[in-house]
Amino acid sequence: MSEVVLNTVIKSRGPWATAMRRLWRDRAAMAALTCFLIILCMCLLAPVYAGWSHAEPFKSTLDATIQINGQTVNVMEQSTEGLGLGYNPIGPTWQLGNYFLGADNQGRDVMSRLLYGGLNSFLIAGAATVLTLFFATLIGLAAGFFGGVVDAVLSRVLDILWAFPVYLLAISLSIVLIAHGIEIGPITIESGSLWLPIFIIGIVYIPYVARPVRGQVMSLRQSEFVMAAIGLGASNSRILLRDILPNVATTLIVFIPLMMALNMLTESALSFLSIGVQAPDASWGTIIQDGQGLLYSRPMVALAPGLAIVLSVLALNVLGDGLRDALDPRSKIKLGRG
C-alpha cells in the first residue's frame, strides 16, 4: 500500500518540483551554487569589513602605518632594489582586518577593494543579464510568433549585431560612449556611471539569447495547443503570455547563470582596459589593472581578483549545466535520475 501511495506522489509531482529535485541531487551544481553564494555574501559584506578594518578602499594612504605583532610598520615601504628609489606596498599580512592581502601601489587595502570590486562586478553582471534577457525575450517572442515583416526586420537587426565580434563591439561602444555618456530622450547616463557598462554589455549579448528564443517560439507556434488557442479566438497577447512564454521560461532560466558568467568576463576585460568601471569605483578588472605593475613584487594584488573571477565564472557555468540538465526532460535518461 505504501508503495502505491509513493508512486502516486511521485507521478503527481509538478515539473518544477521535479526539476528542483534533480538539481538538488546534482552534487556538482549544489557545490557550485554554494561557492557562488559564499563569494557573493562576502562581497555584500564589503562595507562591514571596511568599517571593521578601518581601511580606505578608495583613498590613497601612502603615509599610513599598521601594527603587526606589536611592531609599527609602514604601509608603503622604502624600495631596496637598485638605487632604492620609490616605495613598495606592504605584502599580505594574513591577518583579517589588517591588510590581509597587502596594499596596492597607492597604499589601499587590497582585501577591502577586492570585496567592493566584487560587489560592483556582480551588480554589473546581474543588471546586464536582466537587460539582455528582457530585450532578447521581447525580440524573440515577436519575431518567432508574428513572423513575416516583423521577423525579417528584427532578424536583420540581430544579424547586424551578430556580425561584430562581441568584445570588439563592446570595446568600440565603450570607447565612443565613455567620454560623453548616453542621452536617450529624458534618460541620461553619465560617463562614470555604472549604468554605462551595464548598458553596453547588456546590448551586445542580446542576439546570443534572442536567436534561440526565436527558434523555440517558432516551433511552439506550430504546436497543437497554440493552434487550438488560435482556433478558439484567443488574443495574441494571451497566447504569448499564457501558452508560449511559460514554455520558453526554462530556456531563459538556464541562460541566467551562463549570461552572468559571460557578462562578468566582459566587464572585467573592459575595466582592465580602462573603458569599463571608472575611478573612484572599482571592479575586479580595475584591481587586476592596478596590480599589473606589481606582479613580481606583490602578485596578490592581481592574483586575488583573478582567482575570484575564475571561481565565480566556473561556479556559474557548472550551475548553468546543472540547471540545463534539471530542466531538460531528457536528463532522466541522460543522468539516470527520476
Image (cartoon, rainbow, N blue to C red):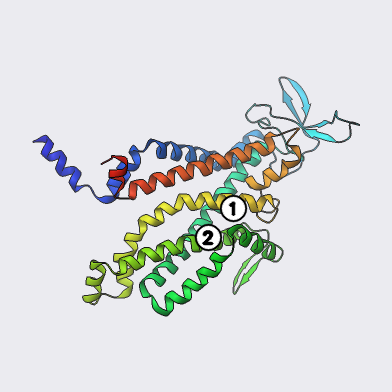
Front residue of 176/51: it is 176
Amino acid type, label 2: Tyr
Q: Is residue 58 visible?
A: no
Front residue of 332/53: it is 332
Looking at the rendered structure, which numbered label has been put on residue 266? 1
Residue displayed at 36% across by 72% down: 145
Disc 2 from disc 1: Cα separation: 10 Å
Res 23 quadrant in image: top left
Q: Earlier in the sequence, mark 2 or mark 1?
A: 2
Q: Is residue 31 visible?
A: yes
Residue displayed at 86% across by 30% down: 81
Looking at the rendered structure, which numbered label has been put on residue 205? 2
Query: Label 1's element?
Result: helix
Residue displayed at 58% across by 39% down: 308
Residue 72's spot in the image, x, y percent?
A: 77, 24
Front residue of 186/238: it is 238
Looking at the picture, does residue 317 appear above or below residue 189? Answer: above
Query: Label 2's element?
Result: loop
Amino acid type, label 1: Thr
Residue displayed at 38% across by 47% down: 323
